[in-house]
Image: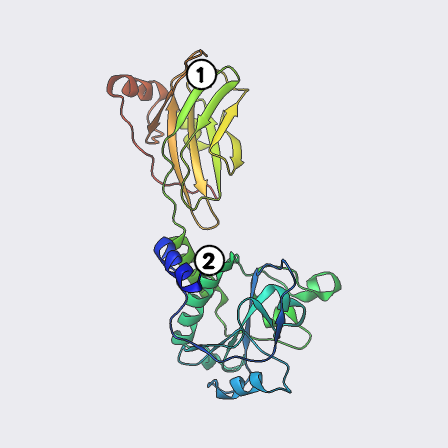
Amino acid sequence: MSASILATILLFQTGITQPEDITWNPSPHYSSRPAGQTIDAIVIHTTEGSFTSGGVVSWFQNPNSKVSSHYILDHDGAIIQMVADDKKAWHATYYNSRSIGIDFCGKASDPDTFTDPNMDALIDQVAWLCYKYDIPAVHPTGDAYDYPDDNLDEPGFVAHGQVQPWNRSDPGPHFDWDGFLSAVQAKLAAAYALTAPTGLSASVETSGISFTWDPVPSAALYQLDIAETGEELDSMTGSFQTLYVGEGTAFTWSAGDTAIPYSWSITAQNDYSSASSTAAMLSQAPSPDSSNCSAILPRNPARGLAAVLGLLLLLGTFALRGARSLQ
């Protein structure tokens, strides 16, 4: 599949695409990543030069420099790519194999290095890279001195100064890590937004109570919670328990009491979002033709279980509970 077709598909699915104003200006300083190596980190640098990219581009292309980054961010937000993502740029010593390097034109000691245009460009580019390579949008604390052999070993967004604290400090104290991290996470949360699970069904089988639900697009895993009453399910107290966390869309509970009309919820989750639906189960004895014995309900702590069941019997209504994060 071509890169352009892939980008179109990802735009349709997520709304995140690579920024368009990227100029390709290749550096000869790169090597192959190790076989099977995943890209799980982005290293943020400053060039420690002027605000314009001309000098650093020339240096990264100089046969004697033996240094490079994948991307350079100009002061006006323009992006220059110098090494292909699938290649190893020479920017952060032992972190090169696992990372993508991005350089700001400017100096770590100068707050004017970081402008609205180049920070916006960084956020857009990093959100794209996170989606494309499944890089976690996290910023670890500490530095290489906190790890065996003085080698930082964390995925996510790291400073050059964290990788090499003995001789580097960039991007320095003026880089807004909190704002940058929050902005990238917000873009990814919007792209990975989940819908509440549908198709909730609970059936009494000879092997126990079988719970099923429909798959939710972009969900990485599901969490099944259950309680003897809706109130305990909402408050996560009393008989409340989590039965299952995993990738599947079905679970059989062999320890369940078929005489109890449990309330239960299923939550779809990924790294950035979660969404839940709740159901109340009408108890039923096991039989060869056991069938759906659940109705999806809004969660309402003020309503007793008897009232909920009465409403089900009289009206047979169905309603999805709104999204609730359990992360």
Mark 2 or mark 1: which is in front? 2
Vertical comparison of 285 with 83: above or below:
above
The amino acid marked with disc number 1 is Ile
Circles 2 and 1 in contact, beta carbons < 8 Å: no
**Looking at the image, which residue is at 44% across and 63% down?**
3
Q: How many marks?
A: 2
Task: Identify the image quadrant of residue 255.
Answer: top right
Residue nearest the observer in this picture, 320 or 38: 38
Task: Identify the image quadrant of residue 318.
Answer: top left
Residue 47 in percent (x, y) is at: 54, 81
Which residue is label 2 attached to? 131
Drawn side of residue 98 relative to residue 107, left or right? right
Residue 145 in percent (x, y) is at: 70, 66
Circle 1 SS class? loop
Q: Is residue 275 among what the camera can see?
A: yes
Drawn side of residue 29 relative to residue 132, left or right? right
- Which label belongs to residue 260? 1
Residue 147 in percent (x, y) is at: 70, 61
Circle 2 SS class? helix
How would you rate the neighbour count of disc 2 (Cα within 10 Å): few for under 14, some for 14-19, many for 20 or more? Answer: some
